[in-house]
Image (spheres, coloured by chain):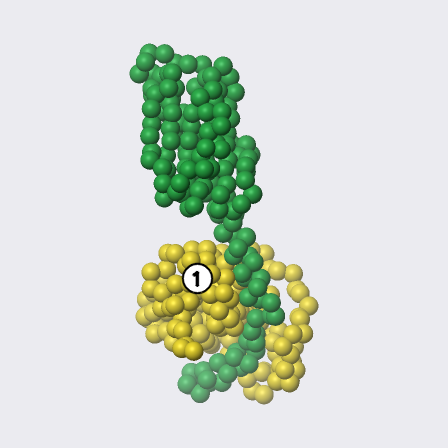
Chain colours: A yellow, B green
Amino acid sequence: MPVRDEASYVVDAKTGSEDAWRHLVAAHQDRLIRLAWALTGNRELAADLAQETFVEAFVRIGQLRDNGAFGAWLRTIVVRAARRTYCRPPAMPVLESSHRRTPQRELMGKELRTAVDDAIASLEPIYREALALAMEGGLTSAEAGKLVGCSPEAYRVRLHKARQTLRRKLSDHLME
Amino acid sequence: MSVQEDNKLDSLLRQAAPEGARPGFAESVVAATRARRRGRRMRSVVVGLAAAVALAVGLGVALSRSQTQVPEHVERVRTVEAAPAEAVPAAEAEDSFAVQFVSTGERPQRVMMARINGTCIISARPNDEMADELEELLRLPAAMAGSVSAVDGGAALAVALR
């Protein structure tokens, strides 16, 4: 059975195929949730943002001209969706679910995860965006800058400041 | 800052990042998408219907003025403009539905919208000329020519949109 490329699933998704939606979600969900987390520093909000991003993408998928650019389009939508959350009051803390718990995750420790979440959440949104896109990878400074609406130089400065701040806030964990 | 320090920080962030989606995430996305698309379809029906009502009323006013007579019913029709609560689904099937507004007064008018095989049909006629027109519309083929004509000082509008 020939392997289908993603663009063909996007074509089907445009006709309303739920199987195509499922395939595209499965292909991008983990990456999108991590990106949403880096944009917010909040795990629960990240899952909600990722879901909202997929829904918005599928509802408006007819507007996507380049069927091969679905992943990049999702990235644009999630950045915009995250910006809409910046003015919201912080979400109530939710007990962490136990799904997909791995030995490595157990070792990681809740304390460290909380420290990283708090450090990211404490950054100004423009620095979180720069950090998130750097973690996402695959983008040049020019591409990332264009996505967040600044020059490549400004993007690099933002990323530098974001890393500098995180390094200071997480110094105890970085020395371990 | 050195590249080594950057790498160390990135490694820590990657370790702390969420592992991925919860079980059932894809299904919840599909269900939410389905619901959102259904909501958008219904909203577009109501908006289209409101536009049809506004168009019909506008035509009625224009035609009435051109005949130097402003019928009382025109004002009454205007009162039902863009009132989504009055849109009543007349068929349960998702791809073949009809909604209608019925005005009141001495010369009542009815504005209807039906979707048949992907074709959206909007119609506005005086009530007394089209008692069973809704049922007729539902039996029509996919295509229908648009027409506008004067009817007894008011307006008759039939439009097919694909």
> How far from the left and from the top, in percent, is residue A96?
66, 70
Quarter of the image where one finds residue B119:
top left
A41 in relation to A91, above or below = below
Residue B136 can be seen, yes or no: yes
Per the image, label 1 sits on a secondary structure element best described as helix
> How far from the left and from the top, in percent, is residue A161?
44, 73
Question: Is the residue marked by circle 1 packed among few (<14), some (14-19), or many (20+) residues within 10 Å?
Answer: many
> How far from the left and from the top, in percent, is residue B55?
38, 29
Q: Which amino acid does label 1 sit on?
A: Ala
> How far from the left and from the top, in percent, is residue B40?
48, 47
Task: Locate the N terminus of chain B and report the quarter of the image it occupies.
Answer: bottom left
B162 in relation to A103, above or below = above
Q: Mark 1 points at which residue?
A: A13
Task: Locate the C terminus of chain B and report the quarter of the image it occupies.
Answer: top left
Front residue (pair A19, B133): B133
Front residue (pair A43, B50): B50
Front residue (pair A23, B137): B137
**Residue for point 41% across, 14% down:** B71
